[in-house]
């Protein structure tokens, strides 16, 4: 699909939801992001709707001017906040391990800022002490107790069993959040 446009399909390829940008400017292309001095951190809002047009959820990157973390916020269809997909501060250089440069772990936090789950991108090759590790597109999800709840392979998101509404919505929204965090 085009920039800031996504689709959710079922196992048979039937459309479950389409996601389009409803607020924010035109994003830079992949090549533009590669050579940009910094990532796009402007405010952007996307909305997921069912094939009949019923809103399912919205996701917002608040923008650096409003929130220095730019952690995407997920909203229920009624506009109430479901939660946030927040990079793990101990892994992305904002905590004690400031030398780490790659984000590979995210906390799925509810509206009260309680951690409901974790998404962790698999590192499949370490290239050296001072070089960034190579990442795959594979992401594993777990609940706070460490039970694996879902898996994303870069194209397909598989949820292992029914989840509470908030956690399920946060898991479903993460592939879009990853793009927004990457400056898309």
Image (spheres, rainbow, N blue to C red):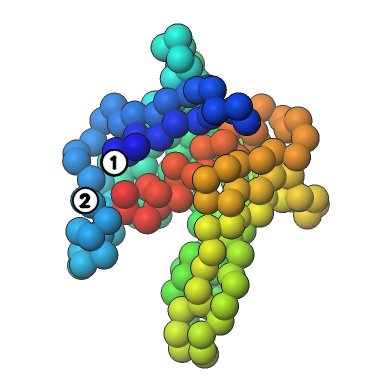
In front of the other: 148 or 12:
12
Which quadrant holds the N terminus? top left
User: Which residue in the structure is indicated by mark 1?
Assistant: 3
Q: Is residue 5 above or below residue 135?
A: above
Q: Disc 1 on helix, strand or loop?
A: loop
Disc ID at residue 113: none
User: Which residue in the structure is indicated by mark 2?
Assistant: 28
Left or right of 143, for residue 41: left
**Residue at point 45%, 15% (across, down):** 51
**Residue at point 52%, 51% (across, down):** 154
Q: Earlier in the sequence, mark 2 or mark 1?
A: 1
Q: Residue furthest front?
A: 12
Q: Classify residue 139 by image quadrant.
A: bottom right
**Residue at point 47%, 70% (across, down):** 102
Judge whether residue 76 can be spotted in this image: no
Q: Is residue 47 above or below residue 24?
A: above
Measuring from the top left, give residue 73's x and y in whole percent: 45, 38
Left or right of 6, for residue 3: left
Measuring from the top left, give residue 8's x and y in whole percent: 50, 30
Measuring from the top left, give residue 38's x and y in whole percent: 25, 64
Q: How many marks?
A: 2
**Residue at point 29%, 27% (across, down):** 22
In front of the other: 101 or 26:
26
Q: Residue furthest bottom?
A: 129
């Amino acid at each position: 699909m085009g920039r800031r446009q996504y689709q959710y399909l079922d196992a048979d390829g039937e459309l479950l939801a389409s996601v389009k940008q409803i607020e924010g400017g035109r994003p830079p292309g992949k090549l533009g992001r590669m050579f940009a001095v910094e990532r796009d951190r402007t405010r952007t809002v996307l909305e997921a709707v069912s094939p009949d047009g019923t809103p399912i959820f919205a996701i917002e990157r608040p923008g650096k001017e409003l929130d220095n973390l730019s952690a995407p916020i997920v909203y229920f269809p009624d506009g109430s906040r479901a939660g946030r997909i927040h990079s793990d501060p101990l892994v992305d250089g904002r905590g004690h391990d400031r030398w780490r440069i790659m984000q590979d772990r995210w906390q799925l936090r509810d509206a009260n800022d309680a951690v409901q789950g974790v998404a962790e991108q698999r590192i499949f090759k370490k290239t050296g002490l001072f070089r960034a590790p190579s990442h795959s597109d594979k992401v594993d999800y777990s609940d706070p107790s460490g039970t694996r709840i879902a898996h994303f392979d870069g194209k397909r998101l598989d949820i292992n069993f029914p989840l509470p509404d908030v956690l399920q919505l946060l898991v479903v929204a993460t592939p879009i959040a990853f793009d927004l965090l990457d400056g898309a």
